[in-house]
């Protein structure tokens, strides 16, 4: 990775270092998908190093990145966990608040899975099925109409005649961004709705993609702002519902959940690592580099996180469900060097 250059005031950094010196416990927040991995690492770090166990909190990827960008110093977090890549708007907010260097660390990959009650019907989905189930506007007889599909069989005769009820990640979650892109927009295109929406928006593809992400408001699509445990609880109370989860959460709850295929592929560590399973994404954490060398143990923690012992294919993160990054060695070198991220493409 190439280094992103910034003009950083030595006085500002010195002031930040003095402020941050007062805290000796690493502070982390963000993605509920990355949360269990970070918790595993934090607990092992506390047991094996002469530093306090880091404090790891959830809140969602977007919220974590926003907290990272609040400023520099002891009252701000050191790391934001994220299941979607940082946005230019985050980087701009960071810069406005004096956070001028960020390190981007990719820890591995995860899949997004579609699961229902373990004793329920089997589902074999395509992205088009999901768009036709919960998209606001769908194609019927060659025209865009308001979505009136009631059952999954209305969407696709090969699916069970079960009422549509979907519990999907709320908009503050990184999982939602991937769901929007790889399920809704892909499904919108698959069904022909994207072209129709593009025509309706004067050929504007971005406006059409935004329209593809508009969902029904009649109660069949429910945003879940909490973590996957809330989605699981909703499924337990609504046995006919389908929930959206991270692969690792599903793998740790196979006694309660039945997973669906997507485009004929069963989600698994192997199918995600090979790229066969279509709904997968890299997982990240972002480090405030101004806190390196200031917050005790921060460099040691991030080195430990990406070590073979933790993030490698035989480590505890893989055992929990993380798909190990084939380029982990390059990440280890980048982290050891403290290299800030390059500008976004």
Image: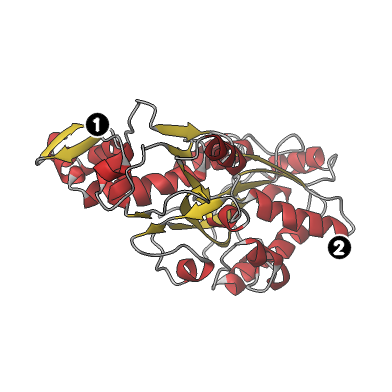
- The residue under the point 53% across, 39% down is 235
Quadrant (top left, top right, bottom left, bottom right) of the C terminus: bottom left
Q: Mark 1 points at which residue?
A: 148
Image location (x, y in percent) of residue 42: 77, 54
The scheme the figure's colours follow is: secondary structure
Residue 208 or residue 88, whichever sits in front: 208
- Residue 253 x/y as whole percent: 61, 53
Q: Is residue 342 left or right of residue 318?
A: left
Q: In this view, does 337 lie to the left or right of 330?
A: right
Is residue 295 placed above or below 237 in the rendered structure? below
**Secondary element at image label 2:** helix
Residue 48's label in the rendered image is 2
For this view, does 196 lie left or right of residue 113?
left
Secondary structure under the numbered disc 1 in the rendered image = loop
Determine the residue located farthest toward the left in the rendered image: 142
* Image quadrant assignment for residue 50: bottom right
Q: Distance between the residues labelled 2 and 1?
A: 57 Å
What x and y, as percent, mark residue 212? 28, 39
Per the rendering, the mark at residue 238 is none
Instruction: Judge the density around disc 1: few (<14), some (14-19), many (≥20) Cα neighbours within 10 Å.
Output: some
Q: In which quarter of the image is residue 131?
A: top left
Q: Can residue 203 be seen in this view?
A: no
| Residue found farthest to the top | 218
Residue 243 or residue 57, whichever sits in front: 243
Q: In this view, does 141 lie above or below 52?
A: above
Q: Earlier in the sequence, mark 2 or mark 1?
A: 2
């Amino acid at each position: 990775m190439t280094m992103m250059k910034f003009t950083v005031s030595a006085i500002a950094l010195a002031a930040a270092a003095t402020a941050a010196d007062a805290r000796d416990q690493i502070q982390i927040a963000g993605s509920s998908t990355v949360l269990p991995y970070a918790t595993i690492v934090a607990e092992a770090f506390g047991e094996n190093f002469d530093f306090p166990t880091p404090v790891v909190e959830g809140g969602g990827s977007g919220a974590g990145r926003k907290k990272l960008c609040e400023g520099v110093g002891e009252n701000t977090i050191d790391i934001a966990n994220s299941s979607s890549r940082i946005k230019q708007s985050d980087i701009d907010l960071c810069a406005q608040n004096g956070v001028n260097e960020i390190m981007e660390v990719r820890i591995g990959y995860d899949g997004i899975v579609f699961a229902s009650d373990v004793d329920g019907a089997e589902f074999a989905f395509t992205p088009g099925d999901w768009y036709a189930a919960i998209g606001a506007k769908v194609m019927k007889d060659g025209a865009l109409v308001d979505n009136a599909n009631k059952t999954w069989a209305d969407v696709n005769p090969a699916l069970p005649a079960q009422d549509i009820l979907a519990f999907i990640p709320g908009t503050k979650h990184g999982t939602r961004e991937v769901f929007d892109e790889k399920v809704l927009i892909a499904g919108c295109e698959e069904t022909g709705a994207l072209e129709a929406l593009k025509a309706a928006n004067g050929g504007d593809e971005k406006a059409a993609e935004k329209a593809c992400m508009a969902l029904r408001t009649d109660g069949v699509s429910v945003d879940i702002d909490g973590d996957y445990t809330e989605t699981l609880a909703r499924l337990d109370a609504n046995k006919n519902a389908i929930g959206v989860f991270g692969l690792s959460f599903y793998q740790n709850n196979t006694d309660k959940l039945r997973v669906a295929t997507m485009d004929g592929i069963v989600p698994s560590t192997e199918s995600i690592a090979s790229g066969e399973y279509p709904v997968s994404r890299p997982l990240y954490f972002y480090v405030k580099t101004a806190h390196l060398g200031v917050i005790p143990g921060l460099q040691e923690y991030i080195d430990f996180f990406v070590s073979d012992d933790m993030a490698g294919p035989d480590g505890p993160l893989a055992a929990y469900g993380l798909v190990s990054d084939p380029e982990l060695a390059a990440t280890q070198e980048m982290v050891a060097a403290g290299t800030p991220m390059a500008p976004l493409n």
